[in-house]
Image (tube, grey):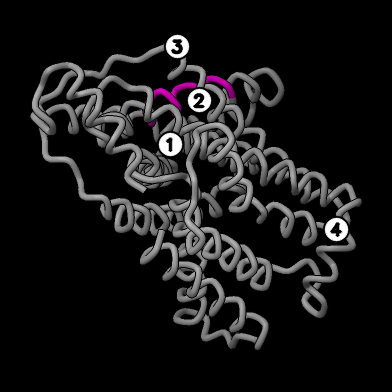
Amino acid sequence: MGAALQVHAARNEHAGAPMFQCSPMPTEWAWIPITVFAAFAQTLRNATQRKLVGELGTLGATLVRFVYGAPFAALWLAIVCAVTGLGLPGTTRTFFAWVTLGAASQIVATAALLRTMQARSFALGVAYSKTEILLVALFGLVFLGDTLSVPAMLAVLLGTLGVLLLAPADPERPLRALLTGWTSAAARWGLVSGACFALAAVAFRGATLQTDTASPLLSAATTLLVAQLLQSVMLGGYLAARQPRTVRAVLVLWRPSLFAGFMGAAASAGWFTAFALSSAAHVRTLGLVELLFSYAISLKLFRERFTRREIAGMLLLVAGLVLVTLRG
């Protein structure tokens, strides 16, 4: 935790400027409320996108997130520059390599998750995709040298186990199904999805550490805009070639798509800022609070009753969230 602060501060000191000259740096705990905000905004974005799937299809609804999110990302970057008094940060080829890897990985992860929906063992594939949190910790260590304390690693394990109990492949025997079903096509696609989502998180964190600025907020805003533009071009180009009607529908339905784009940009701004402040494993583990938001909505609006397994899963998830927050 705080590695990004050290990196940004070191750059500023090397340049001969006083540390935090242009704007006060967030404290080492700032990533916590920022991550919770990102998870909440993502919950709202998902709910909005869900309404668009019926008219645009899954890929069309996904494109909305990028196309209509990019203008808000640009506006956010302008606001950050105005507030901090800083200009656009310098970037490197490594920065663009990380952003491109993150953008492509996120799209592939989404496609792989969609592929699991076509498999007979859909629930099993989704369960395997939940290994993302474990893979984020592994990739963060391998590619960025982000180490985790023993309590933080325990939080990752508790969070993963809690999620698997909340969304099991087999409600009657969740762990057995997970251990015995790894050879199925759905499981393999689920693993691909989880691995690519994890790679995207680590890549975006890597990109935020490659900007020439002492402000993590500005670094995150810059990374966000570049990523959204790249993803708009990548996914938009693919759909324009393969499903041109979907692209036209996305443009026609601009009014209902604006809110989804806004909430998507808000969620991504939160994620990217948190990535600039702490390791991707810390951020993604705490980001599981999104599931608690969803369950709270179900309990409040639909008065659903939870099973013992779901209660156990939520308790494990809460334990992981508390642990990564207090000891991460």
Marks 2 and 4, the one that precedes in the sequence: 4
Left or right of 189: which side holds 299? left
- Is disc 2 in contact with disc 3, using a CB cutoff of under 8 Å? no
Whether residue 230 is in magenta: the answer is yes
Q: Nearer the viewer, mark 2 or mark 3?
A: 3
Quarter holding residue 91:
top left
- Which mark is first along the chain, 4 or 3? 3
Marks 2 and 4, how far apart at CA: 31 Å
Query: Closer to the camera: disc 2 or disc 4?
Result: 4
Quadrant the C terminus occupies: bottom left
Which callout, 2 or 1, points at the residue further toward the start of the chain?
A: 2
Mark number displayed over residue 93? 3
Residue 232: give its label: 2
Is the residue 266 above or below the residue 131 in the image? above
Q: CA distance from mark 2 to mark 1?
A: 15 Å
Q: Nearer the viewer, mark 3 or mark 4?
A: 3
Point out which mark residue 109 bears.
none
**Residue 136, image quadrant:** top right
- Which residues are drawn in magenta? 224-234
Nearer to us in this view, 224 or 237? 224
Q: Position of residue 280 (x, y in %)?
A: 47, 45
| Residue 183 belongs to the span the image colors magenta | no
